[in-house]
Amino acid sequence: MKSISKWFAGCLALTLVIFASCSSNAPAAKSSTKAKGPFPEEKLGWELGSQAYTFRLFTFAEALDKIAAANLRYVEAFPGQPVGAGSSEKMTYELSPEGRNLVKKLLKERGITVHAYGVVGAKDEAEWEKIFQFAKDFGIKVINAEPSQDQLDYLSKLCDKYDIKLAIHNHPEPSHYWNPDVVLKALEGRSKRMGAAADVGHWMRSGLNPIECLKKLEGRVYHVHFKDLNAFGDKKAHDVIWGTGKLGMKEVQAELKRQNFKGMLSAEYEYNWENSLPEVTESVVNFRAAL
C-alpha cells in the first residue's frame, strides 16, 4: 500500500507540474479591474486620469490595470512604452494593425479611454502627420508636444485637418516653453485647436506661480499635468500626495473652475516609481474630496 501511495503521489505531483507549465503559456486572463466611481469631476467637464508615464516601469497593459485600480478611467499614453499583454511592440505611430487592435481591446476591457498622447516630438511634417493619423485612429483628443518653432505653422494646419488639439507642454527652465509667455507667443495667429498642456509641477520647479500661469493662458488650456510637490522653486522637488505639498490644490481647482476648463487632467506622479499606486490612489481621493 505504501508503494502504491508513493506512486499515486508522484503521479499527482507530475500532473500539477505539467498543468502549471501549460498554464504559464496560456493567454493572460481578461482584466476585471475597472474604476467604480463616483466621479464628481464629471459635473465640471473634467476627465481625471493618469499619464501612463506614472507607471513607466511597467507595460501599457500593466499601467492600465494600475490606472483602473486608482479609480480612474482616462489615460494619456506616452510614446515608447511597451504594450505588453504578449506583444513586443511599443506605443508609437508605428504600431501594427494587430498591435492597435490589442491596445483597443485592453482599453475596452478595463473601461479606460485614451484621451491624450504625449509628450511627443517629430523630425518633420511627414512624421507629424503619421502621429496625427495614429491619434485619429485611437480617437485621441489632444496631442501633447514641445515642437520646434519652425514646425508650428504646419502643426496648426494638421490640427485643423484632423480636428485634433495640440497642446504645448512646459518642462522646467531652461526648456524652451518653460514660461507661459513663450507658449502664448507660439499660439499667436495659429489654429484655435492649438493650446497649452499646463504642467503645474514644472511651473513650481521653475519658480512660477501656477495660478498666475493658468490666468495668462486662460481659454487656451487644453490639458493639465497635475502634480503636487514637496518644495517650490526647486528643480529637484519631488511629487507628494496631492493636497499635502506646496501646490495649493484647492486654489488651482478653483482657478480651473473659474476658467470653465474642460478636458483631461493627467496624474503624472514621478516619484516612488516602483510602488506609486497607493500614493496616486490617495491623491485621487483627495482631489475629488476637495471639489
Image (tube, rainbow, N blue to C red):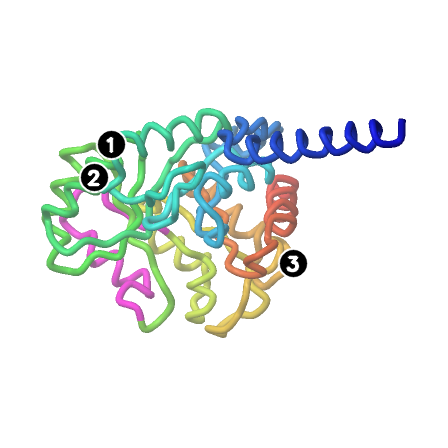
How far apart are the alpha carbons under marks 1 and 3?
A: 38 Å
- Residue beneath disc 2: 132
The residue wearing badge 3 is 244
Whether residue 246 sits left or right of residue 73 in the image: it is right
Q: What is the spatial separation of the Cα atoms under label 3 and label 2, in whole angstroms?
A: 38 Å
In the rendered structure, the answer to whether residue 83 lies left or right of residue 136 reads: right
Q: Are marks 2 and 1 in contact (CB under 8 Å)?
A: yes
The three-letter amino acid code for the residue at tag 3 is Thr
Q: Which residues are magenta?
A: 175-197
At label 2, the amino acid type is Phe
Q: Residue at x 38, y 39 (%)?
A: 87
Q: Nearer the viewer, residue 99 or 78?
A: 99
* Residue 164 x, y percent position in the rendering: 24, 36
Dot 3 alpha-carbon crowd within 10 angstroms: few under 14, some 14 to 19, many 20 or more: some
Q: In terms of image quadrants, where is residue 159? A: top left
Amino acid under disc 1:
Lys
Q: Secondary structure at mark 3?
A: loop
Can you name the residue that lies furthest to the right here?
1
Disc 2 is placed on an element classified as helix
* 186 part of magenta stretch: yes
The first of marks 1 and 3 along the sequence is: 1
Q: Residue at x 47, y 65 (%)?
A: 204
